[in-house]
Amino acid sequence: MELQLHRMDYLQVAVTSQKTMKLLPASGRRATQKVVVGDQDGVVTCFGIKKNEAVPVFKTLPGQKIARLELGGALGTVQEKIFVAAGSEVRGFTKRGKPFLSFETNLTESIRAMHISGSDLFLCASYIYNHYCDCKDQHYFLSGDKISDVLCLPVERLERITPVLACQDRVLRVLQGSSLMYEVDVPGPPSILALNNGNGGESGEELLYGTSDGKIGLIHIAMNTPIPKWEIPNEKKRGGILCIDSFDIIGDGVKDMLIGRDDGTVEVYGYDSANEPVLQYDHSLTESITSIQGGCVGKDGYDEIVLSTYSGWVTGLTTEPIHKEAGPGQELKMSQDMQNKIASLRSELEQLQFKVLQERDRYQHSSQSVTAVSAVPVFSINDKFTLNQDDASYSLILEVQMAIDNVLIQSDVPVDLLDVDKNSAVVSFSGCDNEPNGNFLLATYRCQANTTRLELKIRSIEGQYGTLQAYITPRIQPKTCQVRQYQIKPLSLHQRAHAIDQNRPMNTVSLTGQFSFSDMHSWVVFCLPEVPEKTPVGENVTFYFKNTFLETQLECTYRKGEGLFKSDNISTISILKDVLSKEATKRKINLNISYDINEESVGHTLKLIHPKLEYQLLLAKKVQLIDALKELQVHEGNTDFLIPEYRSILEEAEKLQEEYKKQPAHLERLYGMITDLFIDKFKFKGTNVKTKVPLLLEILDNYEQDALMAFFETAQ
């Protein structure tokens, strides 16, 4: 059955955070549900819908930013009590808006995640997990990386308390009391947790997770070991997962999985006969979906998916048919209710336009007086700067609560801006002097009207590090701008991994000296992405990384006074040695550096580069042939005389040119990596081979793998 849903916008509140909107249980058998939403102004708003109008039930006064909103109540009863987390405080309200709880926790940081089960309260700050029972401290756990979400398996079904933490290092941590029971590796940084089917599935132990890079998975959290059930990869390159719910929107008696993503995509997954998820419906909005839930809000008898968005819209995708069609010779008559509603909306719009003009005139008049004080408008920005594993590029996502006018991108390090299909902004580049000012990139994106979300793609070069800055100017008066800064790290294309292949030929660099554990950790944070800023607990730590571009790997093990780094790529070791030496010198710490270079690793790295280089050279050659082949086609009138290879190039001409355009400087980037590898290999031997680089480039232009390998072995 094809699912048809129609959009209805109900209400707009202030900017909302993730998981801050819920539907209250229906009070009667055929009653519609009330919606409760918390925003970043600290206001909790509860409303229902009557005659297509939002009717308020209650609204609280502004306060601290609301980070989470959950429903609770005694186990086995209707879950209709409202709990909100704001700052380090948890407040409770009845469904009528009467406050009944104000619990100031002992957390020194703001609450980031919350889960409620009966009288048990599970709270998480950045790294700290706390369990309270009847507002009394029970258990505590310090996580190895930042916590994104927390969930507890259903206590009423399992008769045990099993909290699960979603952590940024691609791990789910399953706890028992204050102890770690075990860790579950997942394919991306988990951003959201939800119980399968809303109740944990048949066993009560089935957990859904969504990752910030757009993957979804199901895991059975058994007592001793986790059992992965299925995983949905992000093949369509959609946004990260922000919210998950289970609800039978299709109406086949089986609960479907509802997904909200940070690029505004809403997805509905049904299940096939093998209990595997199948995409049944998707819909795109223009901003992040912060919360999602299935229910009945707008009209009795019509199920819908209710969403809250980043800018505060509470929207429904309803099964109620909105459009009516007339048959031949028939006329559609608009009901009196609809006519009254349209007249009311027009009147309200005219009043708002008049009020805006009045306020604008008043502001202009007051700003010209001697005693005028101009207030800078404050606006919220939701930004994300993440490394994409698929194409080794960084995604910079900027989302503003109002329309964006323009975004200026400035970088003091060489980076390439890549095309993004979803991006409709017009980009213009400015010339920059990299010598005196350290500017390598100045680009302006001018956005179309009503654009609130902009996605950019950037590719960096390892070994060259600095700062990327985004100046965001929204369409508001008076003109104002906010700056966001993003660090391009020395080993910027590396991504955290759970394990690495220990059988590869490895190069090693060892550092010893009078430095502390926290000193070395701060240097590693400076060099590599996805490392927690907080110094790990214990005397030593080991991190594994994979290069998303070349698929080489890196192992970092360090403790107080000692650091050991292993990689199958000499260039990685060279960058680390140079940067760590520089950072230690800044702090006036003497380092003793020793290294062990494995000659086999050079050939191994060249073999990893080979398929990419061969593909790019072939692509460049095909693109160069397109114009000549098109001329031949015009001249001869057909392509029958061409060999099959040339005919296929003509047939795929548009696709080839588009791919080539999407990857600017890709070939130059590979040439640069091979050149760096060549220089670094001989640098560790104490030989400067920069004079032989032109010869190397000549070999690359007439590329053959064996000839390149031979050159690396014989050059001195």
Image: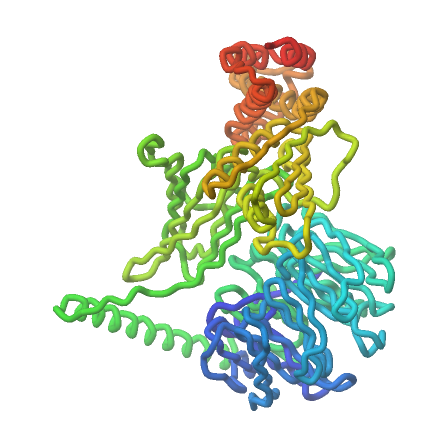
685 to 144, vertically: above or below? above
Q: Would residue 613 be visible to someone looking at this image?
A: yes
Query: Which residue is at 51% across, 84% downward?
Result: 56
Q: Position of residue 419 (x, y in %)?
A: 50, 38
Q: Would residue 611 be visible to someone looking at this image?
A: no
Total labels drawn? 0
Quadrant housing the N terminus: bottom right
Q: Position of residue 691 (x, y in %)?
A: 49, 11
**Residue 506, located in which quarter of the rendered image?**
top right
**Residue 616, located in which quarter of the rendered image?**
top right
213 to 677, vertically: above or below? below
Quadrant housing the C terminus: top right
Q: Position of residue 212 (x, y in %)?
A: 63, 54
Q: Is residue 83 left or right of residue 343?
A: right
Q: Is residue 608 left or right of residue 491?
A: right
Q: Position of residue 45 (x, y in %)?
A: 52, 80
Q: Is residue 91 left or right of residue 118?
A: left
Query: Which residue is at 61% across, 80% downward?
Result: 83
Q: How is the image coloured?
A: rainbow
Front residue of 562/323: it is 562
Instruction: Give the residue furthest to the left.
Output: 370
Query: Which residue is at 52% across, 15% downward?
Result: 688
Front residue of 649/456: it is 456
Front residue of 693/353: it is 693
**Residue 568, located in which quarter of the rendered image?**
top right
Query: Which residue is at 57% across, 57% downward?
Result: 262
